[in-house]
Image (cartoon, rainbow, N blue to C red):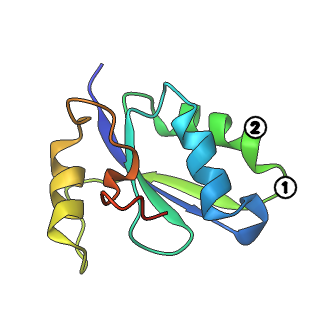
Amino acid sequence: MVNKAYVFLYSDEVGTRAQVKKFLDGRPEIVNWKHELPNSFFLISPNDVHELSALIRTFAGEGRFLVMECSANRQGYLDRDTWAFLLKRRPWATKVTSARKPDGDP
């Protein structure tokens, strides 16, 4: 299956960033993820948006969220590493969850 890039936006009711990270880390369907903006993650997964939404729903409870595929029709002001992450749509050699900094930035 081909990996796709997604944007996952969520309300505070879904959980804290740390709680969401822990959930994403435990899911083999999510091959990698990165965060840059509040209450959002960029996801890489071979699963489609319906499968990811159903998966996240098991964690989100009554919290609101949106999962959408990043298509070629996109624009914004993000870090260069984030654009590369979205364009390459693949995991690193080892799963580098959040592409986090060496100091363990949450």
Identify the residue at horizontal 46%, vertical 53% (top origin): 68
Query: Residue beneath label 1, please?
Result: 62
Determine whether 31 is above or below 98 in the image: above
- Residue 15, percent across and down? 73, 60
- Residue 29, percent across and down? 48, 27
How many labels were placed on the picture? 2
Name which residue type carries label 1: Glu
Query: Residue beneath label 2, please?
Result: 58
Does residue 40 appear in this view?
yes
Q: Secondary structure at mark 1?
A: loop
Identify the residue at horizontal 37%, vertical 40% (top origin): 32
Residue 46 lies left or right of residue 25; in this view the side is left
| Viewer-proximal residue among 13 and 69 | 13
Residue 73 lies left or right of residue 50; in this view the side is left
Q: What label sits on residue 20 in the rendered view?
A: none
| Viewer-proximal residue among 12 and 2 | 12
How dense is the environment of label 2, judged by Cα within 10 Å: few (below 14), some, or many (20 and up)?
A: few
The residue positioned farthest toward the bottom in the image shown: 77
The residue positioned farthest toward the front in the image shown: 103
Q: Are marks 1 and 2 in contact (CB under 8 Å)?
A: no
- Residue 97, percent across and down? 39, 44
- Tell me the distance, in whole angstroms, between the alpha carbons under discs 1 and 2: 10 Å
Identify the residue at horizontal 42%, vertical 64% (top origin): 105
